[in-house]
Image (cartoon, coloured by chain):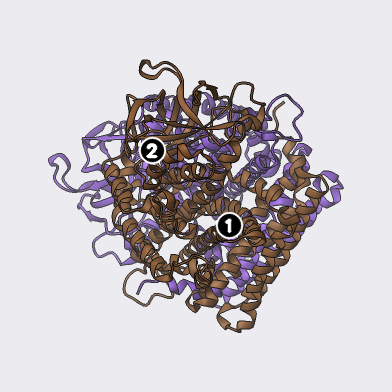
Chain colours: A purple, B brown
Amino acid sequence: MYRAPVEDIAFTLKHVAGMKSALDAGRFGDLGEDLVDAVLGEAGRFATEEVAPLYKIGDQQGAVLKDAAVTTPLGWKELYRRWIDGGWNALSGPEAYGGQALPTMLGVAALEMWNSAAMAFGIGPTLTMGAVEALDKHASENLKAKYLEKLVSGEWMGTMNLTEPQAGSDLAALRARAEPAGDGSYRIFGQKIFITYGEHDFTDNIIHLVLARLPDAPAGTRGISLFLVPKFLVGDDGSLGARNDVFCSGLEHKLGIHASPTCTMIYGDGFQGAKPGAIGWLIGEENKGLACMFTMMNNARLCVGMQGVAVAEAATQKAIAYANERRQGKAASYAGAGMAPIVHHPDVQRNLLTMKALTQIARAISYSCAHAIDLARVSDGDEAAHWRDRANLLTPLAKAFSTDVGVDVASLGVQVHGGMGFIEETGAAAFYRDARIAPIYEGTNGIQAVDLVMRKLPLGGGDHVHGYIAELAVVANAVRTSNLEGFGRTADALDAVFGDLTQATRFLQKLAADGRPDEALAGATPYLRLISLAAGGAYLAQGALADHNRIALCRFFAENLLGEVNALKERVVDGAESLAVAGKTLISA
Amino acid sequence: MYRAPVEDIAFTLKHVAGMKSALDAGRFGDLGEDLVDAVLGEAGRFATEEVAPLYKIGDQQGAVLKDAAVTTPLGWKELYRRWIDGGWNALSGPEAYGGQALPTMLGVAALEMWNSAAMAFGIGPTLTMGAVEALDKHASENLKAKYLEKLVSGEWMGTMNLTEPQAGSDLAALRARAEPAGDGSYRIFGQKIFITYGEHDFTDNIIHLVLARLPDAPAGTRGISLFLVPKFLVGDDGSLGARNDVFCSGLEHKLGIHASPTCTMIYGDGFQGAKPGAIGWLIGEENKGLACMFTMMNNARLCVGMQGVAVAEAATQKAIAYANERRQGKAASYAGAGMAPIVHHPDVQRNLLTMKALTQIARAISYSCAHAIDLARVSDGDEAAHWRDRANLLTPLAKAFSTDVGVDVASLGVQVHGGMGFIEETGAAAFYRDARIAPIYEGTNGIQAVDLVMRKLPLGGGDHVHGYIAELAVVANAVRTSNLEGFGRTADALDAVFGDLTQATRFLQKLAADGRPDEALAGATPYLRLISLAAGGAYLAQGALADHNRIALCRFFAENLLGEVNALKERVVDGAESLAVAGKTLISA
């Protein structure tokens, strides 16, 4: 079973993603390494001892809907209670409302552990934290006073209601509507689908954040507003009042994360004989709902990226343990009696090292994104702008690359287990099932790639990304000048990779400048993987320079996996025309 | 829902995999294109209209075990009956026992369609056909007379009993034992696991082929014998007699192919109060069981490869259909009103074209393997040896590359569906679940790669593979001299690929010759993918030369996906040392 890799996580935070220098420079105030280590250790203990043991029952029982009420699996409600009692929901929450306001880096490190232990558990609070952020930034003082403290503590949970059947990636197609009631409140009507933890038994109240259109709102995304709609109305003293006109009409039957209730929510249909119309309050300005939602979506994207890292870590641990136990055949490197543990077979080693390396680079990218968010928060002026750009640049990498890694690593994990991998009781297959959602939700990975190429490469007049590449290239130099033999051809491999990365980046920037977006879009997905692998190579090398025990894996990655970058570059700079020609053949008459 | 792509299949058989020239040269006797087309058309109709509609209920209900009896999902028993009544089980069976003895090419083409329609259905008869082949080649006339006719017609089904808990990939560790009863029969004792269709309600009798050890048999694989153990004993008149001492004690709870019962079989435990010992008869010689089993395993490997092709085809069809229906966002290439069908988005096109190209090359490789099997059967002397070598060379490619493609394509298929892909009712997730077994059973793909490098590259003194590469390279030349603009840089890409392939091949052959197998094994998996992609590029080009409508996809593949080959080559020739160094760190103390 999963054991939180606290040392690995702490090492990556501090020595790869920049936390150590930030702490040493006092960027996080009083926060010191001791407290960081204590928090990580305690989170690791909770994830390992409390969350992970409930993974299997969560997968098997799943969430169950009856009479508009959702029951979570046996023991999960109590788990959630212990989890908020431990203060984990409040980790990164605003201090004014009882949060500990610890850095995002620490928050996502803990999030990784909850998700490794049980992704269906980890996803719920992610939504609450998103709601906290949106309210904290955009809501009126009245709304904040009434809702934030309980959302920060976790006494209530929050949800995000965006998707409708016809409006998934394209929110411009939203139809849910909101009518002003004349008393400052609104009445919300419509159906929302795929609402994570839209209904459950963890908390007494659930605070829905809902996108809807006001009467006469402009068409498209400029006519969308954001509303707060509580499951139970809340009195001025914080007491729970009447049931609001919103209910869960169905749960999706999903491939994975069975314990996470994925709800169809009906607003304003006259639930239990109520006068139709769910009572809601506007968050932020009218018709500016999408901007408010993006506040939480950016953070949510990083959080989903952590799910990719998390499931990859859990799958890797399980596969390495199995490969050390399971014996089959002979191996030259095994001198013991009888059959060799399969970890001695080169082909099994290749799978396991690939899993390990990909997991570590996804983690390094995601933590680096969190680091940028943190530094943006504690900086001013140009420095803040620099780190905001960095966080924006890294968010699609953290989301898409990490979640692709989650799927690929979980699939390799099944393979390492052989026939046992296909048997549900083994647990490897559950990771493969759970992992598959992460490349889809919070903006499909295809959309992340489009975001990267169209909105992130132009940051800082197109210079920001080149600054990032230059920073990464410094690591390649450090490897070369280290003269450490164990690195093999790592420095050469990294140099080649940064050459390819620079070329592909300039190529896409020029296409955008030339007004040829379709060709840029054709290369978006290979480019996202390219820059992620290149960055990952530098991060692995940086870690290896700080801890020489990590050199062997870095070299394996550089000499076995970085070769893909050149092919990706070719795809970016030379693949669009053939894609466009062949693409036409796919379109039905 | 799946519609059998009869035209595509017929085209690939005839114009890519060599069937047309073989037919024209009269290599298959009277068989002509008309009959081929009729058989394919009728198989396509049966798969589309009869099998595919029962896929979903099979996945949902699964096979159920009660009191040692297995019930298949509603309608499946009747489906099987209609299927054997249509003569489909007898398609490639020996004529002497009622088979139609049609070419393997036709058999695997039909098999692809059954498996696309429902993989859990397609896998059952594959085992029966393996049993037929093993009996036909190795069993005594008595056994053949008693069992073959009913196995060929499908009135009875066959099974393969190899795996035991401690003996999966490594059959040397087998423990099941067989004792001579003194009357020419044996008594079999032991437990077998992962037995596909080991128990079911399709047929009145089930004929188990079981590997076991005789008393005082040598240790390891040279002490294994093969036995025929019927579920019900069979009288000389063919009537069913007493229940034999073999039963199913458990069904596995699997990730996919739920309708296929995966059984734990207990031999000789005194089932229903019987005197312990399952009655069996020796097939072939004592202690030569593995050779007999390999007869059926080689064929079974190609059949499993067809499952990879099949699930990839089904997933691709579904994704293309969805992408033409689902509308989200705007696209430059879409001039219609409202949101564009997502098939217009370049990133979606990239996913779909990748799915389509990989499916087609996996199919071409697998059919080419079947073609080699067929020509070996109808040839003599050197020519027969040549085609046997070719079949042996292509078998690990057909098995491993195709099944990896099955997983990757099914995963892309889920992605194209967005959130709907994660919902079980959509059906895309079921392909992703089903596909995952094929890289594992009948020898994991890692073992296929080892087989390719250690046993297939040395064929013909190491020359056979180079002859194959030379044949493929001819196609690259034909593309160049065609002067068809649509091919873009295809010819250059293919030339580069065959250079890399030759280099990687010679490198691995030299390692083996130099007695450095571990380094060769380190490169085995990347090499298998390398040669498969290279061959696939040539096959796509060959098809495109015969049908210019196929040029666009060929070019997409050459310009977007063949770039991976160079990275794979680097991994083969330069990746072993770093793998060996880092691999040591995976081994527990």
Crowd band around label 2 with a 10 angstrom C-alpha radius: few (<14), some (14–19), many (20+): many
Residue at the disc numbered 1: A393
Q: Mark 2 points at which residue?
A: A260
Q: Which residue is drawn at 43% across and 70% down?
A: B32
Q: Tag 1's secondary structure? A: helix
Looking at the rendering, in which quadrant would you find the C terminus of chain A? bottom left
Nearer to me, B268 or B305 = B268
On whether disc 2 and disc 1 are found on a single subunit, the reply is yes
When the figure is inspected, residue B13 is found, relative to residue B52, above or below; the finding is below
Q: Are marks 2 and 1 in contact (CB under 8 Å)?
A: no
Relative to A580, is B476 on the left or the right? right
In this rendering, the answer to whether A176 lies above or below B158 is below
Amino acid type, callout 2: Ser
Residue appearing at x 66%, y 47% in the figure: B451
Label 1 amino acid? Answer: Leu
Disc with the residue nearer the chain's start (2 vs 1) = 2
* Spot occupied by residue B8 in the image (x, y as percentages of width and height): 44, 67
Q: Is mark 2 on a helix, strand or loop?
A: loop
